[in-house]
Image (cartoon, grey):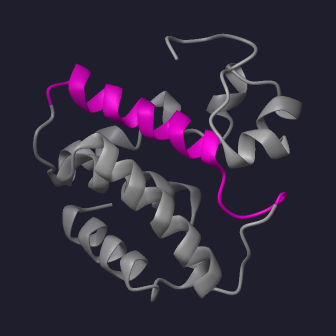
Amino acid sequence: MTLEETTRLVEQFENATLPKEQWTHTAHFVMALWYCMHHPLPEAVRKIREGIKKYNVSVGGQNTDTSGYHETITLFYTTAIARYLVTNGITSLTDRQILVFLQQPFVTKDFALQFYSKERLMSKEARYRWILPDLSDAGY
């Protein structure tokens, strides 16, 4: 994914015009990366949280006990993204940096399950508020 494609994805996400089939696992990460690069972390988290909730509703989804927005997953991966940016001294995005970012181990779909049991991560409690990992803390 290029910087131009990333910018377009974020614009469509914010305007709730991104086609539902394009709201992929990768799109979630690219959107969060963009926000982490353009806003202080607390503001990035707020924008990611509110944006996902809004987007879900815009495509006919719901944010419920079993579907839609998930607080622990959002905070877990946003923290991983922020750590990656700080650790690697990334202060601006390029096409190459986005490509390398998307190859990081934490971008894989089940990465969080190295730290959380599926039962804990998929719990109602984890969906609504941050909960600590139960398998490994990884510095969380």
Residue 121 coordinates in the image, percent (x, y): 77, 35
* Apparent side of residue 19 relative to residue 35 in the rendered image (left or right): right
Residue 63 coordinates in the image, percent (x, y): 72, 68
Magenta-colored stretch includes residue 66: yes
Judged by its main secondary structure, the magenta piece is: helix
Work out whether 55 lies above or below 3.
below
Residue 120 coordinates in the image, percent (x, y): 82, 30
Work out whether 130 lies above or below 11.
above
In the image shown, does 51 or 109 lie closer to the viewer? Answer: 51
Say whether residue 33 is visible: no
- Assign the N terminus to one quadrant of the image: bottom left
In the image shown, does 101 or 79 lie closer to the viewer? Answer: 79
Kindly identify the residue that appears in the image at 28 percent across and 47 percent down.
36
Residue 6 coordinates in the image, percent (x, y): 29, 66
Q: Residue furthest right?
A: 119
Kindly identify the residue that appears in the image at 65 percent across and 30 percent down.
112
Work out whether 25 lies above or below 114.
below
Bounds of the magenta segment: 65-89
State the image quarter where residue 72 is shown: top right
Kindly identify the residue that appears in the image at 44 percent across and 40 percent down.
78
